[in-house]
Image (cartoon, rainbow, N blue to C red):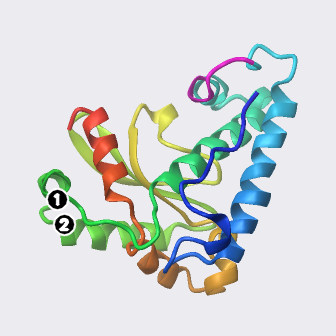
Amino acid sequence: MHKLPKLPFPIEKGIKPAISGRTLGFHFGKHHAGYVNKLNKAIKGTKFENTPLTQVIKETFDNEQTKGIFNNSSQHFNHSFYWNCMKPNGSTPSYKVKKVLEKSFGSFENFVTQFKQKAGTLFGSGWCWLVADGQNLEIIQTSNAMNPLPLNKKPLLVIDVWEHAYYLDYQNNRGESINKFFDVINWDFVEKKMIEAGL
């Protein structure tokens, strides 16, 4: 059975200066917890009951009969990855991270501009990801619960642009929530994922 991850920061303090404790409490304690609970109910007694999460996602993708399992397993993965992408007050991208980003986007600043643009223009609910496709980096949008795993792309960084991720703090100002996200990115985690992807 799947469990909520242990957050690397106190829920009540939020992820300053981007996310309040109130938002984090609802987002983690209600939304993320809800996906985990629904997932465990949906897989009970099925072949997916003891299957690793990433495998569940890949095996239930694009199948109408397992749509509920896919949505909840993917949202559990997406949120768990998202929490790891952040830390209070963020961190500074290393020389390695900047060089990897420069190779695909020309400069670190170009990457930031393109990521903000992609995150800000996603229609409706979803996610914006930095992913590795072999040795190439891409910024992709995914709608609703979708993530890069069924596309055989490796996630490196993600922002949640569902309304529940920012509405209590920013109301309908998604752009400001995206700007603040860059104040709390855990670049050490991004670098770890780059190394795992062979970059």
The residue type indicated by label 1 comes to Lys
**CB under 8 Å between discs 1 and 2:** yes
**Is 25 colored magenta in this rendering?**
no
**Is 54 colored magenta in this rendering?**
yes
Q: Tell me the quarter of the image containing the N terminus.
A: top right
Q: Is residue 122 left or right of residue 198?
A: right
Position of 170 relative to 57 (above/below)? below
Task: Give the residue drawn at x 15%, y 51%.
Answer: 96
Q: For marks 1 and 2, give the CA distance.
A: 6 Å
Residue 145 location (% of width, % of height) = 64, 48
Question: What range of the chain is rendered magenta?
Answer: 50-55
Task: Give the residue drawn at x 13%, y 57%.
Answer: 95
| Secondary element at tag 2 | helix
Q: Is residue 67 left or right of residue 95?
A: right
- Name the residue nearer the viewer: 142 or 185: 185
Position of 7 relative to 1 (above/below)? below
- Name the residue nearer the viewer: 18 or 111: 18
Residue 83 location (% of width, % of height) = 54, 55
- Name the residue nearer the viewer: 181 or 133: 181
> How many other residues sit within 10 Å of disc 2, few (<14), some (14-19) or many (≥20)?
some
| Secondary element at tag 1 | helix
The residue type indicated by label 2 comes to Phe
Position of 172 relative to 10 (above/below)? below
Residue 170 location (% of width, % of height) = 61, 85
Task: Give the residue drawn at x 32%, y 66%.
Answer: 91
Q: Which residue is mark 1?
A: 98
Q: Which residue is mark 2?
A: 108
Q: Tell me the quarter of the image containing the C terminus.
A: top left
